[in-house]
Amino acid sequence: MASSTIVESLRKQIASCEAQLKDLRRQLAEAEHYQQQQREQDSLHQTTAAYSDPFTHDMSYGIHDDFRSEVFAALSHVEVGSPSRKWPLDKTEYKRYGRQLIMPEIGLQGQLCLKEASVLIVGVGGLGCPAAAYLVGSGVGTVGLIDGDIVEESNLHRQVLHSTASVGMSKVDSARVALNSLNPNVRLVAHPSRLTSESAISILQDYDVVLDCTDTPASRYLISDACVLLGKPLVSASALRTDGQLMVLNYPPRPVGDPSGGPCYRCVFPKPPPAESVVSCGDGGILGPVVGVMGVLQALEAIKLLTRQTNEVFRHVEPKPADPPTLLIFSAYSNPMFRSIRLRNRRQKCAACSAQSSVTPEALKSGSLDYVQFCGTISPINALASNERISAENYAKIRLEVNPYTGMEPDKDSHILVDVREKVQFGLCSLEGSLNVPFSTITTTLPNLANTWHNDEIPQAQGWVTELKNHPEKPIFVICRLGNDSQLSVKKMKELGLDHSGQRWIGDIKGGLKAWRNNVDREFPEY
Amino acid sequence: MATDDTIPITVEFSGGLELLFANQRKLTLSIPTYNENRTRSNIAFLVQHLCDNLMKDPRKDMFVLDGTVRPGILVLINEADWELEGEEKYEIQKGDNILFVSTLHGG
Ligand SMILES: [Zn+2]
């Protein structure tokens, strides 16, 4: 107990001395600056004095004071332009950053902090693009970019650094082009590959602040662990559909085992979510400005972290303890759109940041911590027997060709095609004659409907069951986007007795509409 | 009818959990003050109550796993992490706001 008080007190003393040191450095810089100005003025006056002698002798009379001051001004102008005169920032930087420089939150010292700082952006997608744009725009000295993906057309509605022309290019290269034209003063460091457990420490250690702009639980745990081990603050954000979340983690970035440090990702989420519960933007959808808002907020938090010292030391604002850890929730279609939730502190038994930590730099570097395995993977769904499935090509024959054995004309009415995508997706494009029964409706349909009619919603939901029961002789083909939900739907339909104890064939189209597009109809839209 | 037998509360869902509850983001409901064991209703009781009575989606393990909220869901009691309030054992008070947030991963 007593030793921890001493440690705490020493830490405070060091922090206070560091603040004093920083203040002294600033005073020294100011004093030097003043001295330099004085010297220049003195030399100017000497020069002028030397010239003024002849003036006083024979020419000074009749020369207008205004003219004299113009001469001084011209001379002093030469002085300002000379390399001996040092402003802390380049002339162009004053102009470029002028609008933020005049803000007390930034000021000259804040700008110098940004210029000296380095920020790593992991993931140059929907979060990373806007975050990088604002950080590079603000004049952060070094910005690192990590991503192993290439730009796809479906990225462009939200990943604002990439352009139509850069489809197929690596995201890191594409972003570099855009960021370099935005602000050539910033040093950009490219890491055009996925962050791995082996490389995490060596890459992250060169940066002051890390932004987690990735999209999988595995990468989130890895980045958080590396930040904890290296003592780096982590600005973490995520987004899906119309919602976003933001947390500043490991801040203050105290050593492992120090409970006064900010919580890490593992403190907040000690166990990863079941892999089946993790929805990607590709499956769930994402609105561009929603993920954009979150990326912009990450840039803002990074700027606040990097210029925080400035405010305390140079504006003589009372050093405050770091804000308590919070989770900011953004919900585009709720009112209010933002809410801030108070998070817990460091977890006593956290696997990463507590005294009982099992995550070590060695374990990370050796790759013995398998983050992908830790978070689990979804094995491809294989719920049906092969005689319950049909390929897209063979289904096309049923729809489009004359049956070679019976000579029957193709007939869409010979069977029922059930499309189990959600209503919105069905509205985008569908096969002619298909019946839409959304997967969510199928999964929520209860088996023994007749007994559970106490709820208004049930008769409506079971309408599809009645409809399919009305044609007991027709085989049912089930299709979805990729061929997963269709398998589960077939199983459920059989459980609901729609196959009339095996008398009616029910099966799915392998690979769904994706296979239909790839193997049958190239014109069928891809989304 | 909020008598002493029931506690009126607000339950909210975020981060996609609303999809498990017929797309409702906010529920106003009353829960029994005491559960069948004659103990005060706590968060553990509420979670089971929601799962049994209000959840429309049959995939119960998307909300409850091993008798508690599944990993990746934060429970927030009156805008604060439930760990600050005693987690599952927190006894629900009149007018409490309980928010369930599923962590998001997209980016
Ligand atoms: Zn931790």
Image (spheres, grey):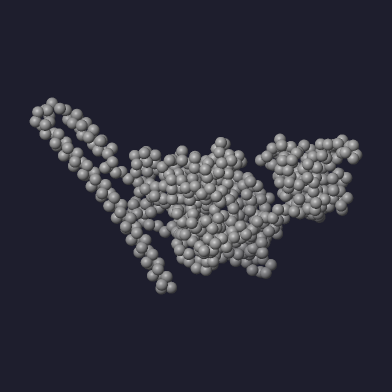
Q: Visible in this render: residue A74?
A: yes
Q: Position of residue A336 (x, y in %)?
A: 55, 47
| Closer to us: A310 or B58 | A310
For the point 46% across and 39% down, which residue is it?
Answer: A182
For the point 71% across and 44% down, which residue is it?
Answer: A481
| Closer to us: A129 or A8 | A129
Location of residue A10 by image quarter:
bottom left
Count of numbered circles on the image: 0
| Closer to us: A240 or A465 | A240
Q: Visible in this render: residue A325?
A: no
Residue that lies at the very extreme toward the left in this rendered image? A57
Question: Is A399 located above or below residue A355 in the figure?
Answer: above
Q: Quadrant of the N terminus of chain B?
A: bottom right
Residue A180 located left or right of residue A473? left
Residue that lies at the very extreme toward the bottom in this rendered image? A2
| Closer to us: A207 or A441 | A207
